Image: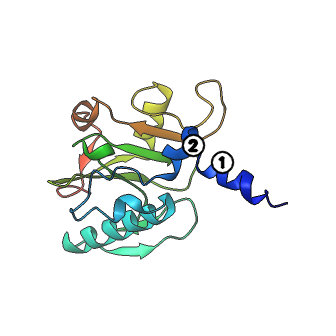
Amino acid sequence: MKLKSDINTQLLSSDSLASYFKPRHNPYKDTIFENYYLLNNKTKGTVGEKFAQEASALLNRKTKKRTSPGHDIIIDDIKTEVKVSLATNGVSDKFTFNHMATSKDYDRILLVGLNPEHTYMVWITKEDFIDFVIGEKYFTHQQGGKKSDNDDYMYITRDSWQDFLNEPCVHDFATSW
């Protein structure tokens, strides 16, 4: 049922709720990422997949459409899961990569980290991702914490991005595939 108009008005003008209804600060205002920042997560993922496809073409790699929902794109016959993150709150090299799983049908994860001044594109194999998950290094449960048994992981880089890039199993997409 609809709320009475006066109750609705009171709720929408409530001091405790007002901050949720105001536009949030966009650290990317007046940059190429101004509108990207406002996209929903599914659309951001689609943009990331398109970004990977176009980068692949520029690097003379062949792409194909996925053959199952377990990966996003096939690059040079390698089933690839693409994860993209815009620098969190405008802070360079602080990324959040969401919804990675150990049981999906892919061979590699391609991480795309977007900064206004530069972009990272690095990849790891599924096996290395699983090793990181087992070793509780970099990747944590997305929902439910350590006690959950879901297969949904994330990587919030905080101050570990450079350490991650220096791992022997992390490869530069521009120079190797």
**Which is nearer the eye, 97 or 135?**
97
**Which is nearer the eye, 68 or 14?**
14
Toward the front, the furthest residue is: 6
Residue at mark 2:
17
The label shown at residue 102 is none
Colour mapping: rainbow
Residue 35 visible to the viewer: yes
Q: How many marks?
A: 2
**Which is nearer the eye, 64 or 16?**
16
Q: Is residue 137 left or right of residue 104?
A: left
Badge 2: how crowded within 10 Å, few (<14), some, or many (20+)?
few
Under tag 1, what secondary structure?
Answer: helix
Q: Position of residue 51 (x, y in %)?
A: 31, 67
Residue at mark 1:
11
Q: Is residue 33 left or right of residue 99?
A: left
Q: Amino acid at mark 2?
A: Leu
Displayed quadrant of residue 58: bottom left
Which is more N-terminal, label 1 or label 2? Answer: 1
In the displayed structure, would residue 152 be above or below residue 117?
A: above
The residue shown at (57%, 43%) is: 17
Q: Position of residue 111 (x, y in %)?
A: 34, 51
Q: Is residue 142 left or right of residue 164?
A: right
Badge 2 vs badge 1, beta-carbon distance below 8 Å: yes
Q: Position of residue 63 (x, y in %)?
A: 36, 73
Q: Position of residue 151 (x, y in %)?
A: 60, 40
Give the CA distance from mark 2 to mark 1. Answer: 7 Å
The residue shown at (46%, 52%) is: 22
Q: Amino acid at mark 1?
A: Leu
Check the picture and name the quadrant holding the C terminus: bottom left
**Which is nearer the eye, 12 or 171?**
12
Residue 100 visible to the viewer: no
In the displayed structure, would residue 6 be above or below residue 32?
A: above
